[in-house]
Image: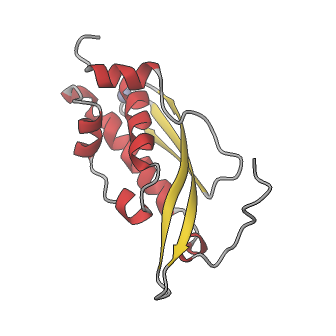
Amino acid sequence: MSQYSEAFLEHYRRPRNLGDLDAPDAVAILHDDTCGDLVRLVVAVDRHEDAGGSSAGRIREIRFKAYGCAATIAAASAITELATGMLIEDARELLTDDVIEALDGLPPGRVHAAVLGLETLHAVLSRLQPACLNGSRRRERNGRR
Ligand SMILES: [Zn+2]
């Protein structure tokens, strides 16, 4: 395991944001044929509207489940940590290099894990209903958890 950084091992041994959400705004599951890895992401967003009427959504919570190599688990964990609290438009801009940097490096043969995790992130964000982004769908904020 010495090919992996301490940051990588930390994410692998104690994954962040592992699990599920009761009321996600979107779900995505992606599968990588190369080594059979699978990543599932669920996301809940907050909507904001500014005075000008334009709007932006922010990632309130994100959870993952992953099956596959250690790198896929560590990368998915790092991605959820990066994405939490981000504007959706900013999270869409996350790059493979950002994930690799968060893991303090990935062996060349493991870069597919960062790619798969990011593709899943992009997929889950693209599945958000437009209403989630423009704030027209109101949801009761009280009474949840
Ligand atoms: Zn893999």
Question: Where, by quadrant of the figure, is residue 130 drawn?
Answer: bottom right
Whole-percent x, y for residue 134 in the image: 55, 77
Quadrant location, the N terminus: top left
Is residue 70 depicted above or below 90 in this figure? above
Whole-percent x, y for residue 10 in the image: 38, 21
Instruction: Dividing the image into four quarters, tell me where ligand 1 lies.
Output: top left
- Identity of the residue furthest to the top in this view: 2
Is residue 140 depicted above or below 69 in this figure? below
Whole-percent x, y for residue 105 in the image: 22, 30
Decide if residue 98 is on the left or right side of residue 26.
left
- Identity of the residue furthest to the bottom in this view: 52
- Say if residue 141 shows up in the picture: yes
- Say if residue 69 shows up in the picture: no
At a point 38% along the width and 41% down the height, the residue shown is 116
At a point 34% along the width and 34% down the height, the residue shown is 113
| Residue in the foreground of this view, choosing between 33 and 69 | 69
At a point 44% along the width and 62% down the height, the residue shown is 88
Whole-percent x, y for residue 47 in the image: 56, 69
